Amino acid sequence: MPTIIFLKRAGGNLVISTAADTPQDVLDCMGRICSDCSRLCEKCGNAAYAQHTMPIRRLCSWCYAKDAPRIRDLDVATEFPDLVSDHTASLVPATGRRWYAIIRKCLVEMRGVVRDADLAPGTVQISDIKAKLGSIRTGFHSFHDSIDLIDQQLHDDSLLTCCRCGHVGERARAFMHNEGVCNRCAVFARYGKNVA
Ligand SMILES: [Zn+2]
Ligand SMILES: [Zn+2]
């Protein structure tokens, strides 16, 4: 029998560590189990993506909603002054509040790039962050190519993130037209909480 040293959840995945003398066919089998788990909700077995939770967990929209993380307020001018003009006193994204997690992640990366590249103050100036046709679009007074991929990634992430609850990986636009929502929020919107 193989000796399992540890078996744990890490980054929304299952990780199994075994003793050095574990046969290859057993390692292959455990690898397949971990691979399967990397596609499934850790609570119920529905198909699922890793979520922006602390720690990272892999949950379907139904299980995510039972313990959804609290969303902190976001004012870009206060939290990321490097990314707005000196004249901007306040810049709150005009998006669903539940998109703040992916916006904040993008802004942290942008600030890192601006600082690492030692760009002059004011080189990057965000003018607005808004929802357009079910996705996030960022407007700029001043732009630099070094942040182009990060900005594109934010747009792509928003296409997979529910703007009502922040769940990642489900999309049910057929119900909600231009709003990007998860399956659970779409069901609630259509039938009401009591029926769902
Ligand atoms: Zn689930
Ligand atoms: Zn949702």
Image (tube, rainbow, N blue to C red):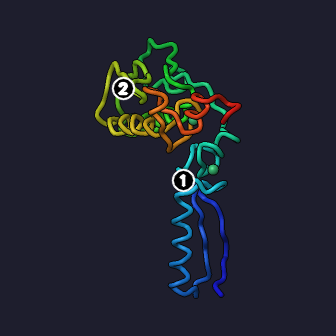
Q: In the image, is 115 to the left or to the right of 18?
A: left
Give the side of residue 1 with respect to residue 27, left or right.
Answer: right
Q: Is residue 66 above or below residue 99?
A: below
Q: Is mark 1 within 8 Å of ligand 1?
A: no
Q: Position of residue 60 (x, y in %)?
A: 59, 47
Identify which residue, 5 or 194, lies in the foreground: 194
Disc 2 is placed on an element classified as loop
Check residue 124 in the rendering and tell me which mark sits there, or answer none.
Answer: 2
Q: Are marks 2 and 1 in contact (CB under 8 Å)?
A: no
Marks 2/1: CA distance? 39 Å
Question: Of the residues under marks 2 and 1, which one precedes in the sequence?
Answer: 1
Q: Residues within 10 Å of mark 1 (few under 14, many from 20)?
A: some
Q: Position of residue 102 (x, y in %)?
A: 50, 36
Whether residue 75 is situated above or below residue 194 in the rendered picture: above
Kind of residue at disc 2: Val
| Residue 40, image x, y percentages | 56, 57
Residue 112, how many percent across, how many down? Answer: 44, 38
Quadrant for the N terminus in the image? bottom right
Residue in the image at 55% along x and 39% along y: 183
Query: Which one is in front in this view, the residue at disc 2 or the one at disc 1?
Result: 1
Q: Which residue is mark 1?
A: 47
Quadrant containing the C terminus in the rendered view: top right
